[in-house]
Amino acid sequence: MEPQPNQQSVIENIEIDLLLEALYRRWGYDFRSYARASMVRRIGQFMSATGFTQASAIIPKIIYDKALFSKLVGYFSVSVTEMFRDPFVYRELREKVIPLLRTWPHIKIWHAGCATGEEVYSLAILLKEAGIYHRATIYATDFNEEVLDKAREGVYEAGTMQEATRNYQQSDGKTSFAEYYHVRYDAACMDDSLKKNIVFAGHNLASDSVFAETHLVFCRNVMIYFNRELQNRAIGLFSESLVHGGFLCLGAKEDLRFTAAEKQYTIVDEKARIYRKSGN
């Protein structure tokens, strides 16, 4: 007897719960509090690509097969990014955040969920053009080691540099964007001077603790994939990390309203989702 449609949905949800629990217990990667619709979609994409017909069938495989586990985790990673994405955000950072960052003798920035690194290098360029990169450290973190490796390399498709140049110019860039990379065959390699103060490291917002004491936390378009509980956890980590007067920059569809930390911040720029920590 075939399960009825509602029964089928219940069974599929149980299978997904078990799969996410297995990932956590075997490999320590916690996706149990990610937005459910996003998890269902990404697991479905993985199944279509690998030939699995049931989520439960993945469990015994990923427990023993690290390569398959890594492939599955790759589907959960948010890797949509680009240089100077949303240029107006970087204009606001130049105008309203950088002048205050320069008042600290050493500047520490946590870029959480950095993906393949394009926005990390964008921040480095911002600091360099402000003349303060030499006394800054950017901690760029992600749970996905594959995208971190790409971020460390700083090598991107040369074809993406045209859009990057437009974004840079719209962000009130101070020079020619071509000064920050060189083209080798069909690849654009970010200049080594941008890499020297960036520390790339693995970190999972769902399960790990505070990464460092920082003056700016930059986490854009990551928490839209979290449920409310995990969003509050991440914001709690950011608040614990930030010094008094430090800044938090979120994505266009993310904000602090209705979160436990809302009263700790004042709005610096609502459209750019930039906040300043004003309380403990």
Image (tube, rainbow, N blue to C red):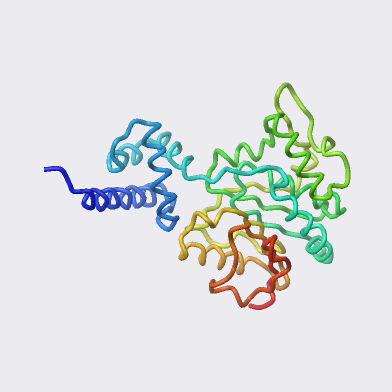
> Which residue is rendered at x = 79% and y = 44% of the image?
168
The residue under the point 74% across, 54% down is: 137
Residue 84 x, y percent position in the rendering: 73, 47
Q: Is residue 126 left or right of residue 78?
A: right
Q: Nearer the viewer, residue 109 or 183?
A: 183
Pick the quarter of the image with the N terminus. top left
Q: Is residue 265 left or right of residue 37?
A: right
**The C terminus sits in image quarter:** bottom right
Q: Is residue 175 left or right of residue 16?
A: right
| Residue occupying image coordinates x 69% and y 33% | 155
* Foreground pick, 251 / 193: 251
Position of 263 relative to 53 (above/below)? below
Residue 129 appears at what percent x and percent y? Answer: 86, 50
Report x, y in % for residue 156: 68, 33
Residue 33 position by quadrant = bottom left
What percent of the width, then of the height, locates residue 270? 69, 66
Identify the residue at image location x=53%, y=44%.
144
Total labels: the figure holds 0
Q: Residue furthest front?
A: 5
Residue sticking out furthest to the top: 185
In this picture, residue 37 sits left or right of residue 155: left
State the residue in front, 87 or 137. 87
